[in-house]
Image (cartoon, rainbow, N blue to C red):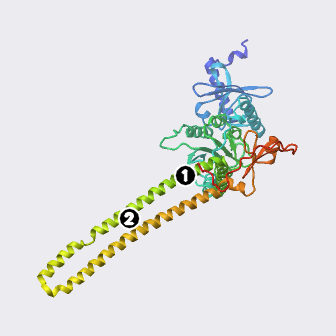
């Protein structure tokens, strides 16, 4: 008797595999599978290979290159996700798998865990160290902004910059969420840093990476490793202004400064122009007052330093007086000589009396006796001219004498003034000049007590004294000045 199994159709391995494949694909056309990624691998072709597992089972997964580029996240081992795709089989290995077309994190807790694990790993590399952070420039010439070109964020930043201190702004437009946003933000940061210092487009002095508020999924691009590394590598000081004040992303830890809002970032990178002008005015006034004080102090020090030995001062003044006396004598002689030349010139210009007489005689000869009375008049004119010449000579001599007398009187007054400034006249008014045993001037009581033995010099002589105990040592012979005779100034 034939067995019932002998009536079963016969399949080749390929036919059976294809039948199973059609059955699985028809029964599970689109599925959502939740599980933990394990054994993740990115092939050089761009395809992604991994397994999704839970506590009791596992299923292989594959994501083709086109779908992988559109994923909203970057898969990693240990990441709990919800994969959406088609269930199919792989006949070459007799296994079934899911072809993933979309993927999302399985709940906010998993996303937060992913961010926290990434934060610890990047912090261990030193990307968040405070030693890497640089101060912002006080007044940047050019500000680079990485954000979406549309929306309120860029308008708020530009408006606040215009209110506080208008600066040149370069905007690098990027997508701030969704597919490719992280790559665009990182590329913009690196692009600004690649600008040459003296290139056609100026290199910014500070960067602002900004985005408005949103959910943790919306801000995920700024938690991606590529963005964090670009911010940490930036040679240009960078300010992160992502989300609202309560939002925190990983770029905040890698940036040089974190602003709670995009508007606050604009306030952080530029000062208030009016406040800066007021501060400059205060600093200028303070500097001017400081310079005045410094100049006054220097003038006082200069005056104190210029007051040296009185004897040297007198000697210098005496030499200067001698020089001016010589110049005065020479000036007087020159004045007399000059006046003499003037008198000679005036005399040369006067009519010669003999010539006048000859002319008069000729006129008398021609006119005869009728001009006899005229001859007498001519003689009177000659006499007057001669008297006039004599008067001019006398006036010139008197003027020269008065000039010499005035300069002699001025010289005497200068000598009297110099003598009145002499320290000897000061001594004659009852003052004394105190010196120690070495002849050094003693200017105060402390120096006198320290010196002990001192010498008191008065106008008519010197007296020795001891300050320490009040006893006077034997007097030395005084050197009185000759009465009624002024000492030499030289």
Q: Position of residue 395 (x, y in %)?
A: 40, 71
Q: Earlier in the sequence, mark 2 or mark 1?
A: 1
- Residue 176 pos. (x, y %): 63, 44
For the point 20% across and 72% down, which residue is it? 355
Q: Secondary structure at mark 1?
A: helix
Q: Is residue 356 above or below residue 243?
A: below
Residue 142: x and y in percent read 56, 47
**Residue denoted by label 2:** 339
Q: Which residue is mark 1?
A: 320
Q: Nearer the viewer, residue 472 or 256?
A: 472
In this image, 134 relative to 322: left or right? Answer: right
Helix, strand or loop at label 2? It is: helix
244 or 295, which is in the foreground?
Answer: 295
| Residue plotted at (50% across, 62% down) | 407
Say if mark 2 contacts mark 1, CB within 8 Å: no
Identify the image quadrant of the N terminus: top right
- Label placed on residue 445: none
- Quadrant hosting residue 333: bottom left
**Residue at figure coordinates x 65%, y 19% from the top left:** 93
Q: Look at the image and tell me whether residue 175 can be seen.
A: no
Bin the neighbour count of mark 2 within 10 Å (Cα to Cα): few under 14, some 14-19, many 20 and up.
some
User: Camera-side residue: 104 or 240?
Assistant: 240
Query: Is residue 251 in sight in this rendering?
Result: yes
Counting the numbered discs, the total is: 2
State the image quarter where residue 12 is shown. top right
Tell which of 404 and 480 is nearer to you.
480
**Foreground tag (2 vs 1):** 2
């Amino acid at each position: 008797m034939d067995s019932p199994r002998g009536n079963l159709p016969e399949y080749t391995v390929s036919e059976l595999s294809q039948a199973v494949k059609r059955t699985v694909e028809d029964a599970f056309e689109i599925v959502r599978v939740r599980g933990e990624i394990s054994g993740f691998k990115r092939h050089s072709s761009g395809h992604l290979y991994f397994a999704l597992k839970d506590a009791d089972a596992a299923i292989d997964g594959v994501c083709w290159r086109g779908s992988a580029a559109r994923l909203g996240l970057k898969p990693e081992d240990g990441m709990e996700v919800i994969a959406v795709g088609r269930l199919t089989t792989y006949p070459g290995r007799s296994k079934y798998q899911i072809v993933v077309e979309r993927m999302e994190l399985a709940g906010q807790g998993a996303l937060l865990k992913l961010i926290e694990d990434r934060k610890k790993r990047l912090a261990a590399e030193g990307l968040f160290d405070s030693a890497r952070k640089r101060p912002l420039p006080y007044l940047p010439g050019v500000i680079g902004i990485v954000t979406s070109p549309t929306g309120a964020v860029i308008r708020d930043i530009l408006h606040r910059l215009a209110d506080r201190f208008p600066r040149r702004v370069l905007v690098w437009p990027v997508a701030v969420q969704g597919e490719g946003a992280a790559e665009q933000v990182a590329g913009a940061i690196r692009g600004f840093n690649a600008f040459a210092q003296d290139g056609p487009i100026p290199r910014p002095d500070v960067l602002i990476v900004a985005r408005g508020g949103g959910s943790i999924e919306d801000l995920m691009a700024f938690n991606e490793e590529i963005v964090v590394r670009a911010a940490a590598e930036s040679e240009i000081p960078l300010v992160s202004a992502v989300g609202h004040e309560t939002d925190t992303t990983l770029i905040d830890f890698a940036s040089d400064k974190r602003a709670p809002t995009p508007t606050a970032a604009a306030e952080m990178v530029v000062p208030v122009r009016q406040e800066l002008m007021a501060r400059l005015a205060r600093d200028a006034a303070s500097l001017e007052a400081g310079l005045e004080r410094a100049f006054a102090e220097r003038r006082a020090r200069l005056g104190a330093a210029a007051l040296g030995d009185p004897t040297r001062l007198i000697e210098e003044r005496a030499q200067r007086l001698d020089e001016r006396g010589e110049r005065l004598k020479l000036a007087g002689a020159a004045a007399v000589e000059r006046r003499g030349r003037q008198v000679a010139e005036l005399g040369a210009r006067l009519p010669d009396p003999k010539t006048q007489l000859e002319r008069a005689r000729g006129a008398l000869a021609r006119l005869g006796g009728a001009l006899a009375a005229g001859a007498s008049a001519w003689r009177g004119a000659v006499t007057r001219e001669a008297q006039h010449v004599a008067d001019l000579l006398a006036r010139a001599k008197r003027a020269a004498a008065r000039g010499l007398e005035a300069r002699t009187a001025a010289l005497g007054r200068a000598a009297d003034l110099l003598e009145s400034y002499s320290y000897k006249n000061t001594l004659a008014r009852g003052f004394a000049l105190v010196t120690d045993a070495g002849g050094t001037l003693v200017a105060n009581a402390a120096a006198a007590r320290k010196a002990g033995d001192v010498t008191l010099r008065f106008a008519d002589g010197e007296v020795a004294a001891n300050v320490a105990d009040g006893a006077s040592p034997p007097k030395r012979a005084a050197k009185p000045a000759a009465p009624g005779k002024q000492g030499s100034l030289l």
